[in-house]
Amino acid sequence: MRKRLRKLLLVFDIRLKEVNMTGEQWWQQAVVYQIYPRSFQDSNHDGIGDIPGIIARLPYLKSLGVQVIWLSPIYESPNDDNGYDISDYCRILPEFGTMADVQEMFSVAHRLGLKIMMDLVINHTSDEHAWFKASRQSKDNPYRQYYIWRDPVDGHEPNNWQSDFGGSAWAFDDTTQQYYLHLFSKKQPDLNWENPTLRHEIYSMMTWWLNQGVDGFRMDVINLLSKPVHFVDDPNVTTENHSSSMNFIANGPKIHAYLQEMNHEVLSKYDIITVGETPGVTTKDAIKYAGTTANELQMTFQFEHTEVDNSREGFGKWSDERFNLVTLKRILSKWQNDLYGKAWNSLYWNNHDRPRVVSRFGNDSDQYRVISAKMLATTLHFMQGTPYIYQGEEIGMTNVKWPSITQYKDIDTRNAYDDLVLKQKRMTPDKMMSYIYHSSRDNARTPMQWDKTLNAGFTDDKPWLPVNNNYSEINVSAALSDKQSLFYYYQKLIHLRQTMPPITTGKYVVLDIADDSVYAYRRISDDAQLLVISNFTEKMQKRHYERPDSATVLISNYDDDLGDTLRPYEAKVYLF
Ligand code: GLC
Ligand code: CA
C-alpha cells in the first residue's frame, strides 16, 4: 500500500507542476498562518509579544510547513482596539520593535521561503492619527475631507447607525459642533473614501510597504469603505434591537470602483496574495470581489459559517448555543459550490476575532480534544480554497473562562457587557458571562503556549493577558515530542495540499447533507477522487459511502480503518 501511495504521490507531483504551468496561482496551493503579534512571543521581558519574538519562531512555522504568515497589525497605535486603530501606517508600534526589526523579519522569512502578509486597516484610523487630529480642528482644514463629518439632526446623531462595538456609530466633536462616523470604537473614525486625495495617499502607503518587501495584504473590513449615498436609517436597528449596522453599510455603491482602482494603481503591479475581510458577503458578492476576472482581490473572508451559532434572540454573536451541523454543512457547501471555477475560497475556522475552533465545533475535554481537533482540521483542509491556521490552532489551544468581566481586555467584550447587562439590563451578569465564554475575542488572544515553563514560555514577565491554565499539557514543546500530536497532523495536511492536486482543483460534492452527525464529501478530479468523512459526535456511527475496494486511506485520526464504523470524532480520507 505504501509503495502504491508513493507512486501516486509521484504522479501527482509531476501533475502539480503541470497544473502550475497551466495557470494555478501560487497562493492557491498555499497555507497561511495567522500571528497575533501581541500574544505570540515576547523577547524583551515586558509581557508583550514582539517582532524579535516572531523572528525567533520562524523556523517553527517553517517546520509546520506553511508558506505564508499573516501578521495582525504591528503599526503605531494607541491600542484602543489592539492595533486595529492605527495612528501611523509607516511606523512600528515601539512595543513590537523597530522598522529595522521588521526588515530583519522580512529577510529571515524570505530566506526560509516564507512570505509575509500584513494587515491593512484602511476603513478607519485611530483618532490619534495626524490626519484626524488635523481634521477635527476646523471645518475648512484640508484634512476635514479625510473623514466623515455631519451636522446634528434635531440636536441628535445624523441617523440611527450602530457601531459594531455597541452604541451609536456617531461621536459629537465639541470644537466644530459636528458628528464624525465611527463604525467601530469612538477612537476609530471612518475614513472618507469619496475623497480621491485620501485614496491616493493610501495607495502610496501600500506601495511603500510593498517596496519594503511585504508579500501581501489582509484587508480589514474592506467592504465597508463605500458608505450608502444617502445616510438613511438602518431599518434593522429598532428600540429593542441595537445590532451593529455593519451589514447594512457593507458592499456600498462605489466599493468595486475603489477596489478596481486600488488593484490598478497598486496590487496588479506585484505578485502578491490579497484577502479582504468582508462581513455580510454572499457568494454572489464574493464573486464580484474575488472572481477570476474581477481585478479586485484574490479571496474574501466570508462570515456565514462563523455566525452559525448566533443568538436567536437578536444578540448577534452573544449566545452560548451549540451549532447545528446541518446548517454548517449547508453554508460551507454553498461556498464550495457557488465559487467553483469562478472565485477562490478562503478556508478558516477561527482567527483573533473568533473563539477557538476545538472549543466551539469540536470537544475540548481531555478525552476528545486532540482527536476532535484533528477531525476539524481534516474537514476544512480537504476543501477547495486557501486554508488559514490561527496561532495555537495547530496545538489545539482552547477557550478560557475567567470569573469576572474585569479580567477581560477586549473592547468588544467589555462594551457588550456594559450595554447589554449594565445599561439596557437585557440579561443577567451570569448569562452574559456564559456568552462571553462562548464568543469573546479574548478566547483567541491568550498567549501562545510554547512549553510548560512559567507563562508557557511566552514571557518571563507578567503577560499582558493571562495564559490559559491548561498550558502545562497543551503546548508546542509537548506537541513536538509526540509523534501522534495535532501539530504533526497539521504538518501532514499541509504537505498533502502541496502534493495532491485534487485538493486544489477537484470538484466538491457533499454527501447526505441532512445527516446531522457526520460530514462527508467527495473531491472529484479527472484522475482521482477523495472521499472525506468526519464524525462530528462522540458517538459511534455507522455510515456507508460508495468507494472501490482499491481505495486507500490517505490520512486518518485513528490508527486503523473500521470501514463503515466511525468511532468518536473519527475523520478519514480515502483516495482512489
Ligand atoms: C476587523 C478586525 C477586528 C477589528 C475590526 C475593526 O473585524 O478583524 O479585530 O476590531 O476589524 O478594525
Ligand atoms: Ca516584548
Image (cartoon, rainbow, N blue to C red):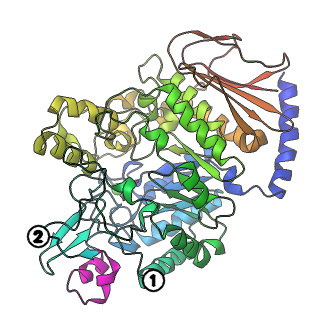
How packed mark 1 is, by other alpha carbons closer than 10 Å (few <14, some 14-19, many 20 or more), is: few
**Residue at the spot x=86%, y=52% of the render?**
18
* Left or right of residue 528: residue 483: left
**Residue at the spot x=42%, y=19% of the render?**
366
- Quadrant assignment, res 261: bottom right
Q: Position of residue 239 (x, y in %)?
A: 19, 48
Q: Report the quarter where the N terminus lies.
A: top right
Picture disc at residue 294: none
Q: Nearer the viewer, mark 1 or mark 2?
A: 2
Is label 1 in a helix, a strand or a loop?
A: helix
- Quadrant assignment, res 146: bottom left
The kind of residue tagged 2 is: Gly
Q: Circle 2 is placed at which residue position? A: 155
* Left or right of residue 289: residue 547: right
Tell me if the residue at label 1 has its CB under 8 Å from ligand 1. no
Q: Circle 1 is placed at which residue position? A: 196
Q: CA distance from mark 1 to mark 2?
A: 31 Å
The answer to whether one can see residue 468 in this image is: no
**Residue at the spot x=46%, y=26% of the render?**
324
- Ranked by sequence position, the earlier of labels 1 and 2 is 2
The answer to whether one can see residue 515 in this image is: yes
Q: Position of residue 376 (x, y in %)?
A: 55, 30
Is label 2 in a helix, a strand or a loop?
A: loop
**Does residue 544 lie above or below 268 as drawn?**
above
Asked if the magenta segment contains residue 9, the reply would be: no
Between 35 and 102, the residue placed more toward the observer is 35
**Residue at the spot x=86%, y=46% of the render?**
15
The kind of residue tagged 1 is: Pro
- Quadrant assignment, res 142: bottom left
In the rendered structure, which segment of residues is drawn in magenta?
129-148
